[in-house]
Image (cartoon, grey):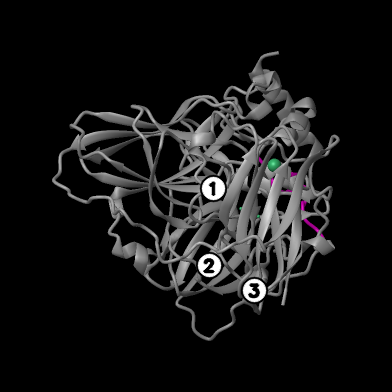
């Protein structure tokens, strides 16, 4: 059977069954994915409650129709925002894309956001990477029902960095993060601060933002998520891989650039795909930042690995180039444990670890620019000190027959927290993830940024030199058979938070748990 046909067959079958494989949805076709949990009240503000906020905005989650490929527009779910108060550059729409508006905040600002759910099912908005109170974190325990509004308030406590926001709905029938994010519910959130501004890194037109996602389309440009039968079983095990890559919600394009340095800030907003970022001419990738902002100093790598939900900040100097030169940012070939070579990924036109272009830079003009890369970058936030006495908490990532993966033998169980998932406010701990599965898991911890202490074991040969472990992170890639230690401090906020695998299909299938910060 040709691929085309099988997509079509699945489409028809699943649409009839009402499970929403295709995103050509009328609301009636969708199951409501989330139930249970506390109802959010419209009149109050969760989190920081104050009379005065520096920034206030409306954020709508809504169905829409957006051209992605040539031809018919695609049905999507997406965010739209209206700035009610605050600096004009707080909200930048991405009008030609399903991506949510880019939200630009400054360290120290107080922010109030009214989230309007105009979708046919429950949703939440998670501010991925931000240090915010538990009730503001967009957790599944606080779903926003269709037609309802939730207002959240918080202070921007993080230092400068590239963060993002996306849906985090999970009900009794399972997770909807994969589906809703895939449908388009994701956007960038940038935090700026004095330290970063003082470095005078390329900005404005010289700062390129790049959101990488993979998608599969059916014949009339309908987005297709998860196959039926055997396909969906494989999708659940490995995570969903689309058969083409989109950059900022469109096929990769050529960007005209000048002979000067650029800052390229990349988010992996894919459900499950890992990227191996490299330059087409083999020059090193100069990494200046990760999830939680700038590194202490730039690092040259032959390539840089970007797992789902991770961000990388890359500096590239084109001042030696000539008009007419081109340079491609690519994802290079790799083997990811057992995952890479799997024949059963054969149904996918773009297997994990294939080589493909992400963006093309075409030098179109010469300019005189002397903006050397500073030797010292983000030095103000000191690494979390750890020593022999720092408590180590271990988490085993293991397979569960036919049902995905577990953390210490447990799967998602609402807000139930086991004894070994309770931590003390103010404590510093090392969390150790041991991966006893044959596939990589990008582990994410909510509400904080951590340092990677070290790795041992594992099977990451073709990715090893590109794992950026310095600096601050909220998501760390744990390779097959590998043990990774991360250090964190539980500061300021007590309450419930979440840790999980950010392969969204793993997460939705239950590779996620709450933990509790106790004061
Ligand atoms: Cu990016 Cu729990 O999420
Ligand atoms: Cu996983």
Q: Is residue 406 left or right of residue 100?
A: right
Residue 381 magenta: no
Tell me which segment is drawn in magenta: 24-35
Q: Is residue 122 visible?
A: no
Say above or below: 206 vs 89: above
For disc 2, the neighbor class at 10 Å (few under 14, some 14 to 19, many from 20) is: some
Whichever of callouts 1 and 3 sits on the residue coming sooner in the sequence is 1
Say above or below: 341 vs 223: above
Q: Which residue is mark 3?
A: 426
The secondary structure type at the circle numbered 1 is loop
Q: Which residue is mark 1?
A: 310
Q: Which residue is mark 2?
A: 58
Question: Which is more toward the observer, 210 or 477?
Answer: 477
Q: At which x and y percent is residue 2? A: 66, 14
Q: At which x and y percent is residue 391? A: 70, 62
Say above or below: 501 vs 79: above
Say above or below: 253 vs 417: above
Distance in Å between CA atoms under marks 3 and 2: 34 Å
Which quadrant of the view contains residue 220?
top right
Q: At which x and y percent is residue 408? A: 81, 49
């Amino acid at each position: 059977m040709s691929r085309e046909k099988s997509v079509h067959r699945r489409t028809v079958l699943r649409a009839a069954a009402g499970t929403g494989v295709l995103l050509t949805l009328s609301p009636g076709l969708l199951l409501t994915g989330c139930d249970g949990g506390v109802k959010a009240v419209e009149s109050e503000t969760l989190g920081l409650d104050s009379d005065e906020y520096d920034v206030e905005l409306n954020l709508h989650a809504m169905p829409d129709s957006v051209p992605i490929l040539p031809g018919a527009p695609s049905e999507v779910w997406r965010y739209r925002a209206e700035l009610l108060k605050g600096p004009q550059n707080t909200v930048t729409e991405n009008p030609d894309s399903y991506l949510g508006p880019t939200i630009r905040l400054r360290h120290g600002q107080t922010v109030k956001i009214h989230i309007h759910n105009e979708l046919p099912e429950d949703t939440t908005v998670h501010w991925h990477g931000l240090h915010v109170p538990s009730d503001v974190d967009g957790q599944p325990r606080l779903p926003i029902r269709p037609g309802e509004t939730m207002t959240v308030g918080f202070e921007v406590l993080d230092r400068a960095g590239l963060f993002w926001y996306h849906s985090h709905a999970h009900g009794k029938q399972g997770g909807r993060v994969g589906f809703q994010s895939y449908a388009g519910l994701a956007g960038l959130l940038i935090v700026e601060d004095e330290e970063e501004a003082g470095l005078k890194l390329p900005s404005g037109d010289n700062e390129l933002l790049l959101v990488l996602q993979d998608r599969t389309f059916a014949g009339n440009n309908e987005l297709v998520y998860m196959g039926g039968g055997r396909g969906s079983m494989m999708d659940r095990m490995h995570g969903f891989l689309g058969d083409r890559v989109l950059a900022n919600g469109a096929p990769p394009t050529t960007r005209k650039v000048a002979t000067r340095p650029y800052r390229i800030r990349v988010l992996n907003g894919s459900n499950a795909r890992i990227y191996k970022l490299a330059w087409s001419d083999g020059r090193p990738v100069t990494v200046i930042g990760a999830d939680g902002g700038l590194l202490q100093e730039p690092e040259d790598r032959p390539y840089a690995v970007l797992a789902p939900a991770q961000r990388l900040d890359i500096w590239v100097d084109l001042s030696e180039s000539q008009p007419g030169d081109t340079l491609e940012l690519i994802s290079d070939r790799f083997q990811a444990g057992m995952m890479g070579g799997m024949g059963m990924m054969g149904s996918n036109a773009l297997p994990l670890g294939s080589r493909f272009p992400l963006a093309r830079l075409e030098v179109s003009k010469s300019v005189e620019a002397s903006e050397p890369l500073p030797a010292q970058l983000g030095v103000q936030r000191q690494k979390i000190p750890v020593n022999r006495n720092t408590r180590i908490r271990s988490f085993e990532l293991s397979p569960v027959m036919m049902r995905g993966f577990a953390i210490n033998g447990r799967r998602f169980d609402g807000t139930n927290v086991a004894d070994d998932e309770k931590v003390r406010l103010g404590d510093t701990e090392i969390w150790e993830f041991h991966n006893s599965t044959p596939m990589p898991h990008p582990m994410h911890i909510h509400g904080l940024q951590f340092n990677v202490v070290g790795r041992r074991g594992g099977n990451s040969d073709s990715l090893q030199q590109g794992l950026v472990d310095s600096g601050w992170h909220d998501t760390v890639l744990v390779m097959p058979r590998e043990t990774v230690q991360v250090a964190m401090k539980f500061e300021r906020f007590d309450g419930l938070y979440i840790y999980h695998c950010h392969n969204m299909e793993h997460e939705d299938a239950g590779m996620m748990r709450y933990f509790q910060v106790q004061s």
